[in-house]
Image (cartoon, rainbow, N blue to C red):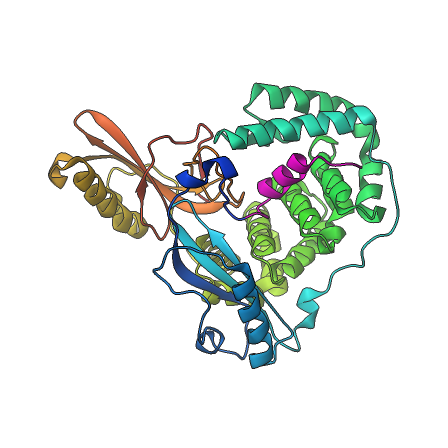
Amino acid sequence: MTTPRRYLASVLLFFGLLAVLPAASCADEAPQWTWTGFEVVGQRTSTRDEILASPPVELGTPYDYDRDAIGAWCRELEERLDLHHARCSPVRFAGGEAYLVVNVVEKGDEHRTRLRPPPEGEVTLATAEIRELFEQLESRQWALFEQGKPPRESSDEGYLDYDDEEMHGYVVRLRELLPPHRENLFEVIARDRDAEKRGAAARLLNWAGDTAESIARVHPYLDDPSVLVRNNLARFMLHYVDQVESAEVRRSVIGALADMLERPSHADRNKAVYGLLNLAKARADDRAYVLEAAGESLERLAEQSILVNVRDPAQELLALARGEPAAEEGEEMDDAEADPVLAKLVPRARADLAQRLSIPEDEIEIVSAERVTWRDSSLGCPEEGMFYMQMLTPGARIELRAGGEVYPYHSNLDGPPFYCEKPSKAGPLPAEE
């Protein structure tokens, strides 16, 4: 399958495999990121301080990703601590925060890096019409991202759809054509040597029907050697995993997601923890098995991770599986002090707006403050020409009123909140309950 470069880039972008990168034509308009923290995950005997001895970046300084220097530091880390594997890469968020992710695999934990051998076959993907429709859909999605207008997703009808009229038209046609080719998609994922083609087949499962049966057939391939394929499969499963009726299949899915949770990859962790959380919320009788299969990994992430789109769902999942009370989220607030996170963020938003408008804070009214789940790392405030990691991110949306005007502020759960002049038309998802 010949894949246009912009199609591949859009697929990588959509599934969170690219950092937030400015388009070349808009580089001068890029936000000023700052090195904010180190995400160090995976160590058992090494300490965080040992790992971060002489780090390659200085916190509080402007973001500058020197790939060669950071790669050399990561290789030196492997040798210095006698690790099996270390992988270092940046993650950036729309609020200006940049984190260096340091994935550590100690000796004795080699299983965390094991993946299935690359397949060596060649399988034609569906039909020429389906391939053309799919590339048109992806090209349209790419164009919308370039415009800073990512489409809003919905799986409420049992398949993935978009609020963009053109993309919806492609979805309608793909739903008509794909069901007879579902077996072909399975075969491509299992046997084809082209990772791009396997990734496309995984994406097309969203419109091939019988999603529960598809999950039963493809979840063993969450150990694909391609991160693109793993992410496309995991994103597909996230939408429908709670529809699987077979307890045996659900247990197998939990096992596959638990393995994915251990991989030295932020993208894998993010998808796996949300997949497990969605399943545990929908199936109370599976929570004990989630704890059995993934409890140790979840505890490590809840303790080690500082990124809200890994740490927070890990903590929530542990509390849910253990039957511990969880805080109410996602409700519009008349009193922001009712939620400790919002109680921290709202005053900071008011202070920022007061400074921005040169008015006293008591002239600023709180219209609403709520926890939400942002659809990507733009936190609901994409800038034209920017590309964002498509990772579900817990956060907050705050609306303030001053002088008759309403000012939206967006944030992750750690803040700081920032004024969003042009919020995305694709609003946030409800906060995880």
Relative to 123, is 248 on the left or the right? left
Task: Identify the image quadrant of residue 211.
Answer: top right
Is residue 8 in the magenta section?
yes
Relative to 384, is 414 on the left or the right? left
Q: Which residue is drawn at 82% across and 42% down?
A: 188
Is residue 382 in the magenta section?
no
- Which of the pair 101/278 is nearer the observer? 101
Count all numbered tags in the image, as a single digit. Answer: 0
Task: Identify the image quadrant of residue 324.
Answer: bottom left
Relative to 89, is 358 on the left or the right? left
- Which of the pair 357/406 is nearer the observer? 357
Note whether 115 is above or below 185 in the view shown. below
**Image coordinates for residue 240, horizontal then vertical, percent:** 64, 40
Image quarter (top left, top right, bottom left or bottom right) of the C terminus:
top left
The segment highlighted magenta reads: 1-18
- Which of the pair 272/423 is nearer the observer? 423
**Image coordinates for residue 290, horizontal then vertical, percent:** 60, 58
Note whether 426 is above or below 372 in the view shown. above
Note whether 124 is above or below 119 in the view shown. above
Is residue 313 in view? no
Q: Residue at x 77, y 29 (%)?
A: 131
**Image coordinates for residue 78, horizontal then vertical, percent:** 59, 75
Is residue 229 in view? yes
Q: Residue at x 79, y 23 (%)?
A: 129
Q: Residue at x 50, y 57 (%)?
A: 314
**Image coordinates for residue 1, horizontal then vertical, percent:** 80, 37
